[in-house]
């Protein structure tokens, strides 16, 4: 999370068991000459991108490109001094360039965007950028019972958001034929926390964090 300082963001990514992707985080031009994280594996000096913009996965025998979209207003919502070398923004022009490159060079059956834009901005992006099949969004915490189908110059894009704080799980099954998305099924499943068995390690961790403040919490 970019709420933390850039050093901690880089450390957290290093400890993350997965791919961290973000097409809209760029290194400021004046910082490129003495960039503190030039050895970070995701840094692309030629494009000036702080992180890998996308990753390619094979899921169920289908080649899928996954593009990352960080929260565009990070320097406004957080102290900019915590992230002095990075710029953000929606960057729909760069998104189009990257999607076009993915389609041409990687030839995936699906292009999916994982976005922190917010539902309203995702819908606008889907109308502007062609070649995206689905945008799975966040930030505005909208629990959407059905995806929004957005038309654009190249076709249509599905946009959805599965709420916040673990209240729902959004499940989308995508049907692919002849290398293209042909159909989908979507469900927004509620999570009943009282029916889930607590994780013992997490219970112990929370108890330890709360222990010094137990008296105040029980007032």
Image: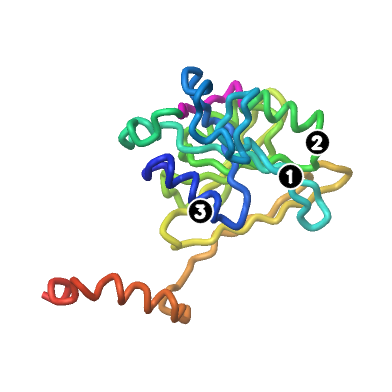
Image position of 73 (left or right of 39): left
Q: Nearer the viewer, residue 61 or 85?
A: 85
Residue 184 position within the rendered picture, expressed as x and y whole percent measured from the top left: 71, 51
Q: How many marks?
A: 3
| Cα distance between the residues tagged 2 and 3 | 29 Å
Residue interval drawn in magenta? 86-94
Image position of 124 (left or right of 185): left
Residue 32 position within the rendered picture, expressed as x and y whole percent measured from the top left: 53, 23
Mark 2 lies on residue = 106
In the figure, residue 23 lies in which quadrant? top right
| Badge 3 element | loop
Q: Nearer the viewer, residue 76 or 179?
A: 76
Choose the circle earlier in sequence order: 1 or 3: 1
Choose the circle earlier in sequence order: 2 or 3: 2
**Residue 77, relative to residue 29: is it above or below?**
below
Are the residues at dot 1 and dot 2 in contact (C-beta closer than 8 Å)? yes
The structure residue drawn at horizontal position 41% and vertical position 59%, both measured from the top left corner, is: 165
| Cα distance between the residues tagged 1 and 2 | 8 Å
The structure residue drawn at horizontal position 54% and vertical position 25%, both measured from the top left corner, is: 91
Are the residues at dot 2 and dot 3 in contact (C-beta closer than 8 Å)? no
The structure residue drawn at horizontal position 65% and vertical position 23%, both measured from the top left corner, is: 46
In the figure, residue 185 lies in which quadrant? bottom right
Mark 3 lies on residue = 162
Residue 56 - label: 1
State the quadrant of the C terminus.
bottom left
| Badge 2 element | helix
Residue 79 position within the rendered picture, expressed as x and y whole percent measured from the top left: 31, 35
- Residue extending furthest left? 219
- Pair 1/3: label in front: 1
């Amino acid at each position: 999370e970019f709420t933390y300082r850039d050093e901690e963001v880089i450390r957290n990514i290093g400890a993350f068991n997965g791919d961290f992707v973000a097409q809209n985080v760029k290194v400021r031009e004046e910082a490129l000459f003495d960039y503190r994280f030039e050895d970070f594996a995701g840094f692309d000096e030629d494009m000036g991108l702080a992180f890998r913009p996308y990753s390619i996965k094979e899921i169920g025998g289908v080649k899928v490109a996954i593009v990352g979209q960080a929260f565009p207003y990070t320097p406004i919502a957080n102290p900019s001094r915590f992230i002095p070398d990075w710029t953000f923004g929606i960057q729909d022009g760069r998104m189009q360039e990257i999607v076009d490159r993915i389609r041409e060079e990687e030839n995936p059956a699906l292009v999916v965007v994982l976005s922190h834009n917010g539902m309203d901005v995702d819908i606008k992006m889907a109308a502007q950028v062609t070649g995206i099949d689905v945008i799975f969004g966040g930030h505005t915490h909208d629990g959407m019972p059905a995806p929004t189908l957005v038309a654009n110059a190249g076709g249509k894009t599905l946009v959805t958001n599965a709420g916040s704080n673990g209240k729902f799980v959004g499940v989308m099954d995508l049907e692919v034929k002849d290398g293209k998305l042909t159909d989908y099924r979507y469900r927004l499943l509620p999570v009943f926390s009282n029916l889930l068995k607590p994780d013992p390690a997490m219970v112990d961790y929370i108890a330890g964090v709360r222990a010094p403040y137990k008296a105040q919490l029980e007032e």
